Amino acid sequence: MGELAVINLRQKRIEGKCKIASLSKAPSLMVIAADSGSRRGHLLGLLQDEIATAGSRVIAICDAPATTDPKSLRRLQVEQLSCSATCETVRTLVRDTNGVASILIDLSCLARQHIGALFAAVKDLAKEGPVELQIAYNLARFVKPPVHWSTAIRRIAPVNSEFAGWTATPDNPIELVIALGYEKGKAIGAAEYLEPGDTWLFVPTSPEEKYLREVHAQNKELLHERMTKQLEYEVLSPVDAYHTLLSLVRGMRNVARPILLPFGPKIFFGLSLLVAMVIDEAAVWFVDGENTSRSDTSQPSPHSVIMGCRIEPVSESAANT
Amino acid sequence: MNRQTFLEPFNAKAMSYADVARTFVPSTKFTQLAGAWNSVLVGPRGGGKTTLFKMLSVEGQEAWTGAAAEPYKKTVGYTGIYVPSDIAWGTMLESLIEAGQDETIGILFSEAAFVTHVLLSVATGMDRHVAQNPMPRLESATGEPTQADLERVVATIATLWKVQPVSLSPASLVDALRARLLDIKRDARLRAKLTLTEVPTQEYLGIDMLESASQALQAFDAVYSRPDHRWCLLLDEFEVAPMHLQKTVLAAMRASGAQKLLLKVALAPCGPDLLYDQQSSTPPSQNNDVQQVQLWYADKTEAIEFCQQVFLSRSSTYPALAGKMPNEVFGTSAYAVVDDSEDAAQIGLFTLRGRNKKHVTEQFQSLAEKDPTFQNFLLRKQIDVSHELGMQPSDLHGNTLRKIAPLVAFRNAYKGKSVGNKRGVKPFNTAYSGWESIAAISEGNPRWLIGLITRIMSNSDQGQFPVPTPQQTAGVQWNCQRYAEMLQSVANEQFGSIKTSTPIYNVLSKIGDYFHNRLVRSAFVEDPPMSFVVDERVSDDVEHALRIAVNHGAIVCYQIAADVGGFRTLRGLRFRLTYLLAPVFKLPMRKSKSVSLSSILEAKPETPVIQNDPSANSAAELIQGDLWVN
């Protein structure tokens, strides 16, 4: 197992546009995606009062150094920083009087590579002491998938070296866990590329029912072939999804090298990274060249969720129990 | 028959040795590879390299039983140690380099991890031998080696490998090496985190892979009083190994004379550039130093025979297929494959009896009605299609008609009534049914063949033979589309040095669409191009995209790779699209003349090409991709 423990998981489901509070006390840092787009600022808008009262720092990650802040970000006093600068901020986050660092990451519109980098930074931070991590996610309104997906895939690879996984048994076969999205052919293509010994599928369900129908349509063959090795997860119940995933990966780590390939809703990408923090053998892969944060033009649905957890070194976790 | 997909077809990596051995069909490739010599096995992903290596390992040899196995097993004069690798292991090794520390130091840790992995396989091989040949605890009158002797040698090996096993047994060596792998990751991370700059002092860094394995095996064999015994490292997917180790191993293959440790490595056809750079100073030659085996067939008969053996090796376990030959199960198609041969079977398909006779003539007549260029061709050749057509060699124009019949069928199926238009019709699938077609589409690749057959049989009523054409074509199309989807997900970067901004599938699509347009929309010709030469005008970016395509088996080279380890460059070489893509791009499977790739890439999409390409040639060198040409 890894050096970290993820404990005290809880979640809060949010419906509508009423102002809300986060799960625990206000985080000292909130990270969102930069650029305009109503879904990017949706959760920040809901948490605005708490953030303002607590004086939390809010950073929007942008791909290139920002020249001017969009009006919406200026109004909410959001700094724009590059991904690496944001990660450095996370690594050096000041802890409270109890020695706990707190951070909230809105995954809704962040690029997967940025999420991977942020979680690597959180991992580093957690090795030094406990971190209260909250991950927030707003479900996008359903839009039909494009007829033609971009074929400009640069590479299929671990999201970064921190989540490349490791093994003392390189001779074990690969077992693949794919969380499905609605990109036709991407899941089966990636699976074929990795030549796994076995493959498990996670199918997202949510109030946006059309999305599920599209996921089924675009992955029809794969779902048919893996009928006995598929699990549904509720996008808005991340705690359950985390436990299901953790349990599956924990079971396979002794006989295989687990690789997680989370397409679809980004909340599952975050959950996969959390599982890989706990299980060193697990790798989290992504397809580089997918939509970047800048290209995400999705609209917010009224459905959101915040999941909280405490990440701490295993030694501390053992001492506390 | 079990339902099987591209996700769980014949994936030897995840199969037990017993399962691989149960249905193993030895080919001439196996014979070329198996002997007691150094060899390089070159083939695309999924081409069967792992199967061959697993079957050369001691575990595979033991699992392979029966009278048919014995002659082959006698030729293997060594104990094979299988060293698995895959893309995921490669990325783990890379992660040690990318972790943020100095790259040179990162490479050291990465190499140490790979060396440990190899030693782990060696130790496992020793452990297996000891388990099967236990030593007595006490000395006997005959002076046989004892447990104490074994312990002494394990202690020697532990010193050599810089490990501290908890007990003096090979099993303990295995455990210690596994623990070392965890240490390597931890140490590399720690260095990166602490941003250490001094030279690392870990003992496991810099251990010579081949020397340490060879010396350990020498010491081990000495205990068993078999100093002449030979071992062979079977390094699968070796392209994922750190570059320095790849260079070292390829250089070591030059060694002549009796070797304690033979080397066999499996590589993708297009390796990293750096590999060839290194070789250019003292490259091992295929002829003198290394036996290079390429996993594709130049000889049609040999490949079909191999496909038939693969079919029979598996069909016997399925009641519906037991005792049947593949021709009985899938029948034959007159439109399957075209070549210039006088093959009796193919001629027989055009004997113009019954339905075939009427159908073929109708195809000619129908195309002549709507295609002025075909009319011109017929006029020029003085062929009258108003009468029944004779296609025997003795008939007037018999050879020409037989040769163009499949082209006419394709063109007629896809050509609209107005000039230059295409019809929106359902695919012309007859070409992709029948045993010859299925074998052709598989390219002699067992995994593809098994995937095709399994899908077809899972869709069909297993009592009806030959399996009806719609079921066959549905199964074929399904596999071909899955393969195309996989290619659409192929990354634009491999091995660090093969990088392209050109999506691989885009290039393949341009090539496939071009050939289809030449076949259907351009003026009718007897021999439209279906192959291409990578010419000098093609950019490096596209050439790199094609290298990745070669590594995935998407294009097949007609020439043999001159360099050890595969193709140093693709320029000047002639290729065709794999027949697994023929149904996707609606192409016939045939040998044909070539066209320069630059002219394909520069052709405007959907523009009919009226003239024959001036750069077209009919190169007829010794060709590796000539699967279906005698």
Image (cartoon, grey):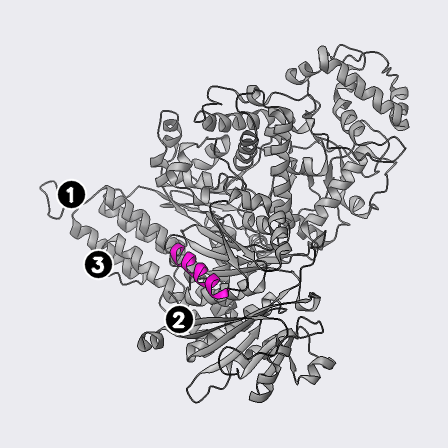
The answer to whether residue B61 is magenta is no
Residue type, label 3: Ser
Tell which subunit mark 2 falls on: A
Tell which subunit mark 3 falls on: B
Q: Of the residues tagged 2 and 1, which is closer to the observer?
A: 2
Point out residue B382 in the picture as x, y percentages from the top left corner: 88, 16
Q: Residues within 10 Å of mark 3 (few under 14, many from 20)?
A: some
Query: What residue is drawn where x is 22% and y is 57%?
Result: B168
In the drawing, does residue A118 fall left or right of residue A309? right
Measured in 3D between alpha carbons, the distance from the residue under mark 2 to the one under mark 1, in whole angstroms, is: 53 Å
The span picked out in magenta is: A237-252
Q: Which residue is label 2 attached to? A: A5
For residue B144, the mark is 1
User: Is disc 1 in the same subunit as disc 3?
Assistant: yes
In the drawing, does residue B567 fall left or right of residue B75? right
For residue A291, the mark is none
Q: Which residue is label 3 attached to? A: B167
Look at the numbered discs 3 and 2 and tell me whether their residues touch, using CB distance below 8 Å: no
* Quarter placement of the C terminus of chain A: bottom left
